[in-house]
Image (cartoon, helix red, strand yellow):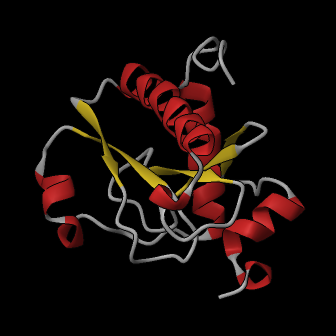
Amino acid sequence: MSPQDCSFCNIVSDGLPPHGLFETDNSFVVLDRKPLSFGHCMVVPKRHVVKLYELTPHEHANVLALAQRFALGLHRSLGCRSVAYLAFGSGLPHAHLHLVPHDDPNTVLEPLKHVRTRTDEQLERDADRLRGLLSDGWHQGES
């Protein structure tokens, strides 16, 4: 798949969609269309590469720094037990890191039992709700 046909590259060129949550110069965060839990989102580098490990060390560090900050915000705001980091590398042909808030490890160990599909309208409502739950200062600091 070329970058022109990539949904994540389209977000880079067109701007964050309504279910987009945050953006830096190098990465962005969007809710997953097939979440395992409320708040399940993806941290996506803006440069088109297929696997996370194909990023430069600087790009990789930026993705992980944003993932850490966002995971801390999700954990605090949702009061969940943990936020899992998942990088499959075999689904969408653009590198991304899943952040999955959960109270039960089976949510990530048995994903097919927990996955659900969200419509555009549901995703937009979820994003609005999540933005309201996130504390005001969670994303301040490094970018």
* Furthest residue toward right: 14
Q: Position of residue 53 (x, y in %)?
A: 45, 57
Q: Please state, as top left, top right, bottom left or bottom right, where the C terminus lies in the image.
A: top right
Q: Image quarter for residue 71? A: top left
- Identified at 74% across, 85% down, the residue is 5
- Identified at 11% across, 54% down, the residue is 106
Q: Is residue 59 left or right of residue 113?
A: right
- Identified at 43% across, 77% down, the residue is 91
* Furthest residue toward bottom: 1
Q: Please state, as top left, top right, bottom left or bottom right, where the N terminus lies in the image.
A: bottom right
Q: Position of residue 38 (x, y in %)?
A: 40, 47
Q: 61 and 136: which one is in front? A: 61
Q: Image quarter for residue 81? A: top left
Identify whether 31 is placed above or below 88.
Answer: above
Identify whether 132 is placed above or below 49.
Answer: above
Q: Position of residue 43 (x, y in %)?
A: 55, 48
Identify whether 80 is placed above or below 114.
Answer: above
Q: 105 and 25: which one is in front? A: 25
Q: 139 and 4: which one is in front? A: 4
Image label count = 0
Identify whether 138 is placed above or below 28.
Answer: above
Q: Is residue 140 left or right of residue 94?
A: right
